[in-house]
Amino acid sequence: MRALYIAMQAEAQGLLEALDAQPLPEQPVIGTYYQAGDWLIATSGKDRTTGVDCVGTEPAALIANDLITRHGVTSLLNAGTCGAHSSSEAEIAQAFLISPTIFNHDHRIPLPRFDEFGRGSHPASPEAASLASQLDLPTAILSSGNSLDHTERDLEIFLANGARLKDMEGSALAWVCRQHDIPLLCLKIVTDIFDLPHPAAAQFEANLAAASERLTHEVLRLRELDF
Ligand code: ADE
């Protein structure tokens, strides 16, 4: 069974409507789950303290583990927004499939083997490259962290990872999928060029609607493929 994880409700709303997705009658404490045909769709849900979407790695990991262990999910798709580094020359609302690898850039543990654990370097779905060519989408390496902005050190590690795209969930989902030996396919849509002087957060807010529209469009295209 396939599940789709989308961190933010605003990113997911158009797709949920297009697929006539229905909320499950019983909801978990963390996450909001919907049924859409044979797909289970999970958003991160709302934080009970602040009321905002539960973006970032902790909710993503908890929900991925729940989807796999309690709902029998054997293949996970993640669709969401990302920042792009200026050297990638990516455009706002451009879509990418992630291949071949997903890293962390803010998980630094300078101890033998723990450094490797912290960096992640998780394999993306082996099908990503062929799906990208079928859909005529570019591929890129993704690096994740728990901040929308970045420090100098984050950027250094991001670049050393060979990454072009930056998000807040991919590596957590990839880590859980790797522990369970199931594939993770990541579709990422650019909302911001994160290393420009114009703050990523302002770009993100300005471009979220256009990126979410593109997300809906590309997930519907992926759904038509037998993958
Ligand atoms: N999602 C969208 N833009 C992002 C950025 N710049 N960093 C992390 N996650 C993002």
Image: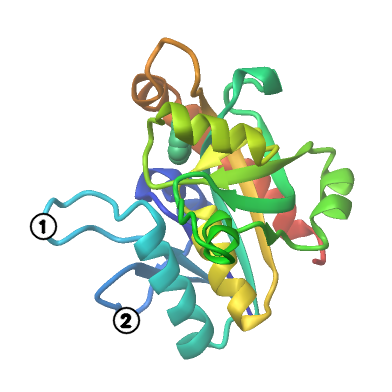
Query: How is the model colour-coded?
Result: rainbow
- Kind of element beneath mark 1: loop
Quadrant in which the C terminus appears: bottom right
Asked if residue 19 can be seen in this view, the reply is no
Which residue sits at x=44%, y=26%? Answer: 152
- Kind of element beneath mark 2: loop
Q: Which mark is residue 22?
A: none
> Measured along the vertical axis of the image, is residue 35 above or below residue 59?
below
Which residue sits at x=64%, y=20%? Answer: 91
Q: Where residue 221 sits: x, y (%)?
A: 73, 49
Front-most of 224 and 194? 194
Q: What residue type is labelled 2?
A: Pro
Q: What residue type is labelled 1?
A: Thr
Asked if residue 227 can be seen in this view, the reply is yes
Q: Mark 2 points at which residue?
A: 25
Locate residue 197 relative to residue 130 in the image: left or right: left
Q: Name the residue under label 1.
A: 49
Q: How crowded is mark 1: few (under 14 residues within 10 Å), some or many (20 or more)?
A: few
Q: In which quarter of the image is residue 84?
A: top right
Which residue sits at x=37%, y=18%? Answer: 199
